Amino acid sequence: MEQSTAPAIELKGISKAFGPVQANKNISIRVMPGTIHGIIGENGAGKSTLMSILYGFYKADAGEVFIHGKKTEIPDSQAAISAGIGMVFQHFKLVQNFTVLENVILGAEDGPMLNTSLSKARGVLKKLAQEYELNVDPEELIENLSVGHQQRVEILKALYRQADILILDEPTGVLTPAEADHLFRILDNLRAEGKTIILITHKLREIMEITDTVSVMRRGEMTATVKTAETSPEQLAELMVGRKVLLHVAKEAANPGDKVLEVENLRVVDEDKVERLKGVSLNVRAGEILGIAGVAGNGQSELLEVLGGMIPATGTVRVNGQEIDLTGKNSDGQSRRARGIAHVPEDRQHEGLIMEFAAWENVAFGYHHEAKYQSGILMNNAAIKADTAAKMERFDVRPPNPKLKARNFSGGNQQKIVVAREIERNPDILLVGQPTRGVDIGAIEFIHKQIVALRDAGKAVLLVSVELDEIFSLSDRIVVMFDGQIMGERDPATTNEKELGLLMAGITDTSNAQMEAKQNG
């Protein structure tokens, strides 16, 4: 008789409510040892709440936790660590002006004599680095490390505390493709050594590539657990949303017309005197989508903010051949809208909406002066509400209630309100930043279709996204930004993630040639 292996983790009947919101409903899940177990679900499905219960951040209202077959109480994160659980958060928990070594031992010191702890940690880190490809200089300050190397430090912290169960929350969100590939090699090595890994991600490609088993959550409930080899991205998407979803945008080849947007030598210096844009030049034609790829924080946000009239800059920007003001009294968002520029900002809650205002008020923002919204010298609120109701119907906003405050809509429906407001103004050019950030798969499909429809109507679209799948799916041309500069332009039909990943890391053909010449020197 074959001996059964106890699950590394078993959750039974876990429920958790926050006031009237039931975040987790009677969830049961088994994660087998030595496997990578993916957990996917729409934004707000309850994934992070469930993992926060496992890591001791929240206490479940009901249910039991078993670690390696033994019922375990986890009242706090220290208890989770003692149970062999480590968690790598999406936003790292590192002290920036401490060294790697100091961060690793922080909270796990062997008594008051730090020298003993540091000496021990050096030896352990060297062994871990060799064993799992977690190479990082133990004496380097965190603030001097790349994001990918900082993530390695977080994994080292967990392993130093002897974790044999690792939870990773959206681990590739801030990584280049090359860094993500390296992370997957690390996870492979950890799995080979018998570690158990839970991977929370919304990227179906990653689930298919790295996991052994995947669980799907929808509206706080566990809807399915399947072997990854026996499913497909399309099936997983349907399980997440509850209906069939088109994962790739169906679109015809672009038919570009005249240049709508021309940008030359654009420069931005922030309030700390740091140059954020360093001579950016590009153009977007009517009837095309120009995608801007890059790891977050490399100047894409500043580019959108300049073009949207939010921050000043130097250089030249022309719309339909006419120069626009970058620093004077006509450089604000209102002036941009008058010139045919619509803007879906990257952060819908802070830049696209006023959360305490109703949907109908948010739909009017920036366009309240339009004749259809006026009644003599007053605004025609009834007309705005009727227009909002019509937009909600066309853009499938749920619930379709113009009087509901923005904060009471889900993230996907908040995004639809912003997209509807901007696209329906028939702009000459749409600036759109992170159009589907924190948006569920069903809403992603819808928003992508609206962007392509605008292109097909002969409009120009400038798309900024950190999601390479989105860039490839939507763009007719791709520009890559790194450190405030354009690293190169590529045709999505002839490039690939590896090539774009090198550009995103600041490596061009020219810099490769220079490195080779130096080595051969």
Image: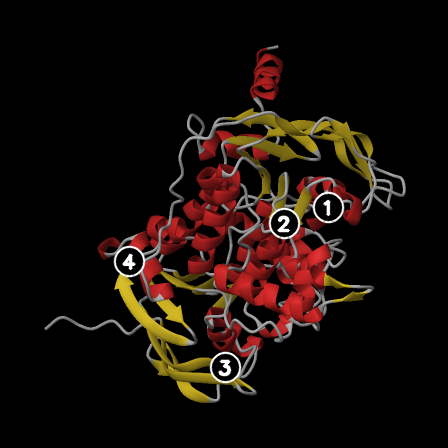
Residue farthest toward the left in the current orientation of the protein: 1
Disc 1 secondary structure class: helix
Q: Residue at x 40, y 44 (%)?
A: 249
Q: Cβ–Cβ below 8 Å for labels 4 and 2?
A: no
Q: Residues within 10 Å of mark 4 (few under 14, many from 20)?
A: few
Query: Mark 2 belongs to which amino acid?
Result: Arg
Residue farthest toward the top in the current orientation of the protein: 521
Residue located beneath label 1 in the image: 337
Residue located beneath label 2 in the image: 425
Total residue callouts: 4
Disc 2 secondary structure class: loop
Query: Mark 1 belongs to which amino acid?
Result: Arg
Residue located beneath label 3 in the image: 74
- Front position among marks 4 and 2: 2
Label 4 – label 3 distance at C-alpha:
34 Å
Q: Residue at x 56, y 75 (%)?
A: 77
Residue 72 visible: no
Label 3 – label 2 distance at C-alpha:
53 Å
Residue 470 visible: yes
